[in-house]
Image (cartoon, rainbow, N blue to C red):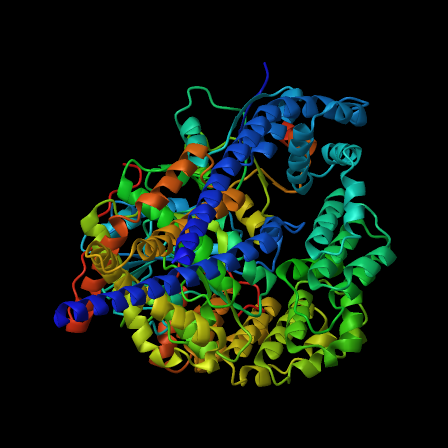
Amino acid sequence: MDVAAGVSTALWLASWFFVLYFALVNGSYLLIHLVSIAVLAGNVRDWLIEPAYEPHNSPFLPGISVVVPAYNEEVTIVETVRSLRNLEYGNYDLVVVNDGSTDATLDVLVESFDLEPIEAPVPVDLPCEEVRGVYQSPRIDLVVIDKENGGKADALNAGVFFTDQPLFCAVDADTVIERGALLEVAEPFLRDPDRTIATGGAVRVANGCSIGRGVVREVGLSRNRLANLQVVEYLRAFLSGRIGLSGIGGLLIISGAFGLFRTSAVREVGGYSTDTITEDMELIVRLHREFAGEDYRIEFVPYPVVWTEVPASRAVLARQRGRWFRGMVETLWIHRRMIGNPNYGVIGLVALPFFLLVETIGPLIEGVGYLLVPIAFLLGILNAPFFLLFLGIAVGIGTLLSWLSVLNEVVSFRRYRNPRDIARLLGYGLVEHVPYRQWKSWIAWVAVVRYLRGEGGWGEMIRVGFDQ
Amino acid sequence: MAERVLVCEDDEHVRELLAYRLETDGYDVVAIDDGEDCWERLEGADELPDGLVLDLMLPGLDGFGILSRLRDHDDLEELPVVMVTGRGLERDVVRGFELGADDYVTKPFSPSEVSARLGRLVR
Amino acid sequence: MNALGSAFVAIVAATAVVGALALVVSILLARFDRRRERARPRLVEELFARLDRPDPNWSGWVGELSLTERFVLRRLLARYLRQLRGRERDRLVDLAEALGVGDRAVDLLASRTVTSRLRGLIWLTLLERDVPTERLRERCTDHPATRAGAARLLSVAGGPDAARDGTSLLLWSGEERLSVFGLDTLYRLNRRDATPLLAHADAEATWWSEGLVVQTLTVLAHCQATERTDRFAWLPALLDHDSPQVRATALSAFARQGWRRELRERVDAERALADPEPAVRTAAYELFGKWGDGESVDWLRYGVYNDPDDRARLAAARTLRRVGGLESVTDGTGQPDEAVARTVAWAGAERRTPRRVATGWT
């Protein structure tokens, strides 16, 4: 009897703990979302204001190197480079880094763009794996660095330390950048040239969009449900999470798929770290760490967009998410001393604790909560109003957050213009709760266990060309 | 017979106005918005246009790319080209002429002037 | 326990409202989009037809248009006025005035919010409307963005004192650094005659923030200046400034003005090349590249041989290649060490030298 009572009390207490944790998680998200609404309301008109001049005609437009790390991208790389050649920006060049691909990535590049080898070793130190050769086009601003395999961060470093441009833009080889996006993501640099050190744009889901010749022609949802679930996730992450965090000066992630950096700042902190699998997040945290106390800006700009193909199968998505989760844990571990440290201002006191408690521990606790609280309810340990509260906080506020992001999309950026798509997005915001969220918790748990055991192992994403 | 002109410009507004101006000045105008499309039309054309009005920053294939392909092509080498572009810095203008543009007009531009410059080349 | 239940109800209600709002707004906006898309072709056709008429009768036409059509027309004008000049543009400016855009923009200047005033300034700039400088000073000096916007307006529509007044607005605080738009405006105001910029710098540069000094020098590096050389009296001291950025951009400014012997003589080449900062030496190599005389080529060659920094040495070698003196390094006397040889080999093998980028950025 006593044991049963003990178990039931424990379950009751645990349920309260989970409900409170859900409240903390979703409450923080809600708060960030409210900030994002305030930022949007205050800035959307500013963002739409185009100063009365032609920036491409100005000698003061900063030069940008677009750095594209490529590993076994023979299917997409030519199309990617073609589309990158057509960005609307007056002063940029392309640096493709072939990271020891085992397929024909280098050959197709050399062939398609009439590249010629530079018959001399690079005369500056590139802190990366050995460079096998550099190829250059005599006609267009395109350089290909061919190097031994060293991973994405290593490939990015080759480009970062090779370029002469004051800014560089890191993009993924499999994304499509909207043509005006480079100028838009550079906007904070143009507005505040001295202080800005990094900016990032929004990443959106390309699955379901029609893409031709490297340009997104029509925006729509996919027939694949898993992809559409991710559309809602990306809206939440980019249109509220990052706007909100950026608004309070606490931006910790600029997506590796699309970020613009001051070259000298990144070199100063030593470039990308090859010790972590989410080098994009780690770099931003390190920039915050090294620049703490100085007057600097790291900003998220929501209107420039890159489109990326997201995993359409559970197995691939699981690997991707496991990797992201593990990367976040690694980054937090590396910079654990910054967490809660007032020397780092908003970053130390708000952004990092938020990432630790909400983004990292949140999904883990959530997963157990989803399991335990319903069981406790079915066993009769929890009464109906309590269970309703749980549902309200977990499912209700969760849905509210998704729907607010959709609302942000509708009133500001409007890539999805068809009301039918909006209705479907709202629907996906609802069905996400079962079983997608639970499944993601499971992925997080697996990633943590693997991390603690010191296991590596995450697969490559298999890609098909965009035009296929 | 009216001279045939191909206008390749991705800004819808500018394209429409340029086409209108050239038409009222007596040209037979085809206006398109994509560089790759532009090249395909020229390369495979049975009947070549008499002139080309070309933007620089285009989707598909940029204006400099089209220009250098034209000048490497036996049948298209002589095609008169007027560049109309927002990029007016010295280095871009020089590059345009180096690649074989016959004229280079910087935005903000006057459509009537473009028409007159084109006339000098094709009439 | 009732509180728990009502919390649940509140959450559900809020969620439902947000969802409904998203849906309704998206439907309304889609409808508005469709109306605009339908209106556009007709409007454009009519607009072009009227452009060529001796009397387009804009106000008559505008009077017939619906609200949606006027909206579409304003958007069209905003695009056209940025891209056009000449006859077509003049006509479109008349149309904009008939639409009341200009008067509304003047009214916007009276607004308290910065964004509204900026929008007003942008329209006025597109229309090239002459607004009294007094009025601009009164309304636009409180924020760097509006000061830059007002200076831009002066640069396109101002009277004979536009360059002076616009430059004053941009350099107003002596503290705030300019945006690229502000830099570009400062450049447009001073590019043919940098007197206003030089006058300000001469009188005030000593108390300006370092960032602003760097920016001013950057702009000056692009301007023609034919003024008396004593206007440049403040410049040589900056070559010894504590900040390497200031030293580097001061060299760039000298590079542009170096066609005048008196100014050229103020640059101590040896000292610039002995500077501990690679960025300063790189600026010096650019300066020698621009001057391009025999002595400058010698200094470049000296840099290729002796610069301890890989990137700065590479800059020297590339510049030397451009002015046509790279071969002389390898067939000269003495055996260059390995780093020098590598740099020279690379600079000689490159198929395209990267374009140099605006200074003041690195």
In the foreground, C34 or A358: A358
**C165 sits left or right of A322 in the view:** right
Q: Is residue B95 above or below residue C72?
A: below
- Residue positioned 87% across, 58% down in the render: C134
Residue farthest to the top? Answer: B1
Question: In which quadrant will I find the C terminus of chain A?
Answer: top left
Query: Can you see residue A33?
Result: yes
Vertical position of residue A95 compared to residue C215: above or below:
above
- Work out which quarter of the rendered image holds the N terminus of chain A and state it: bottom left
A450 vs C134, left or right, is: left
- Residue C179, picture quadrant: bottom right
Residue at (42% x, 23% y) in the render: B45
Q: Nearer the viewer, residue A245 or A115?
A: A245
Residue B46, horizontal then vertical, whole percent = 42, 19
- Residue A191 is situated, as x and y percent measured from the top left of the image, at 60, 61
**Foreground of the two, A130 or C5:** C5
Q: Residue at x 64, y 19 (%)?
A: B26
Q: Residue drawn at (38%, 70%), measured in percent from left and top? A: A283
Image-quadrant location for residue C268: bottom right
- Total marks drawn? 0
x and y percentages locating residue A50 in the rendered image? 63, 49
In-front residue for pair A418/A363: A363
Residue A90 pos. (x, y %):
53, 51
Let me know if residue A153 appears in the view: no
Judge from the rendering whether residue A9 lies leftward or rightward of residue A127; answer left or right: left
